[in-house]
Image: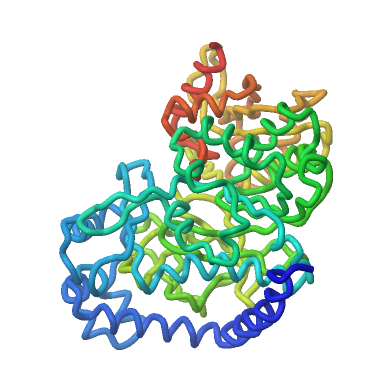
Amino acid sequence: MGIRALLSQPLARYIVQRQKNWIARSIEVQEKWRKDLVKKASNTQFGKDHFFKDIRNYNDFKEAVPVHDYEDLKHYIARVKQGEKDILWPGQPLYFAKTSGTTSGTKYIPISSESISNHIDSARNAILTYIDETGKAAFLDKKLIFLSGSPILTDTGGVLTGRLSGISNHHVPGYLRANQMPSYDTNCIEDWETKLDRIIDETLDQPMSLISGIPPWVQMYFDRIIERTGKKVKDVFPDFSLFIYGGVNFEPYKAKLFESIGKRIDSLELYPASEGFLAYQDSQQDEGLLLLLDTGIFYEFIPVEHFFDENPERLSISDVELGCNYAVIINNNAGLWGYSLGDTVKFVSINPYKILVTGRIKHFISAFGEHVIGEEIEKALRYAMERHPEVEVVEFTVAPMVNSEAGGLPYHEWLVEFATLPVNPEQFAADIDRRLTELNIYYKDLIEGNILRQLQLTSLRKNAFIDYMRANGKLGGQNKVPRLSNDRKIADELTKMNRL
């Protein structure tokens, strides 16, 4: 065992013990963060506008700070971008994380000198927690690859600006940097396909042990390796033992990824966002993600069914319940206040607090009153794939079809790119549909009431989603295709590309 692996073990024990300490005081820790955040920001422009000095308790906080999205905070962020200080958080941000928004265009998410540790230390602690539980650390002495965006940063009002993954690249610990792949020059390549070919050039003859990235882009990396070598990934990288991912549900990609690898390996799920690193998988024994309650974020939760109410109920961590879907609201030490992430989660444990990411608050289908969410369609697809083990799915999205050319009842169209087609596509679609009716009572009522007919499956040609992302300038990096839409914009583009 090499020096990195040896030194990681006592550090892992220390981190896990600290983790246990704050887990035991979760509610107290969250209340402390609420008070500390308000106190520190009381003299900022936002703090003055929202009477932070008069806040005495959580009820006061909810009265003073409304729920915001990026558009609501945009005028404050515009002032920060112009170089003004003490607007949302004392001083100026250390970075802006640049991210694409569906309604707001490009977003500039502040990261402060205090909040950067949330991003960097949480990623480190996820790996150390894995080492402590499994005793596996030898991978640290081999090569590690993080498929990420470019680390090139620009200047916005005196603040360094770039993609979160690129910003994080500048904070890789020195003891890992020598093992990190790809090279800095390759990582700076903007065109994803050119970059991918260069990454393969650099990594093919290296002892890769850890590979990290969003599953569809990692799959693209694996596909190119197999095309070039004619071998499974395990035969190209015999030391590959840990796959780290985040950003999307792994289940739809798992079968094809492991088939490409040629063996089962450990995987570790992270829940990072530009706004904060929220959770990570702290055990290989269960699927829940440990919610990070002591890293500079005060969390609030709104029951999904009330999110669009005029005055939705907001809950602190002490009031959440198991199995309920909540929209996530954060307040952090970079100056985001009452900020709706747009994600939905449900708690699978409250001692400690563990979550599953269930979808996006705006990514649902309710064209007919069914309110189908991401978690439900992913569970339905997984159910069908278990009953049709030959099936491998590359990517998929779902959209409503209100007026079909053939007439008849409306339906949900599932646009799926298969690596391996179902032997019986009609039965595969029926199995998805049956499971969806079990998961969503509104959908069931619409099917049984002859308002909707059974979903229709549209098989897309190879690389349909890659071509769609390329055409929209979103190929590679941290970009993802929405699972669900309430309109047919994405579906119609994919259908058009499918004919090309």
Q: Residue at x 62, y 67 (%)?
A: 126
- On the rendered image, what quadrant is the N terminus found in? bottom right
Residue 190 point in image, percent of width and height: 44, 37
Side of 117 where 129 appears, left or right: right
Tell me: residue 403, above or below residue 85: above
Q: How many marks?
A: 0
- On the rendered image, what quadrant is the C terminus found in? top right
Q: Residue at x 32, y 42 (%)?
A: 103
Tell me: residue 471, above or below residue 81: above
- Name the foreground residue: 453 vs 49: 49
Residue 19 point in image, percent of width and height: 61, 81
Q: Residue at x 76, y 64 (%)?
A: 138
- Name the foreground residue: 442 vs 491: 491
Tell me: residue 64, above or below residue 165: below
Quarter of the image for residue 280 reads bottom right
Side of 452 where 139 appears, left or right: right
Q: Is residue 330 at all visible to an observer of this figure?
A: yes
Q: Is residue 363 at all visible to an observer of this figure?
A: no
- Name the foreground residue: 324 vs 276: 276
Side of 426 where 176 appears, left or right: left
Q: Residue at x 43, y 73 (%)?
A: 297
Quarter of the image for residue 233 reads top right
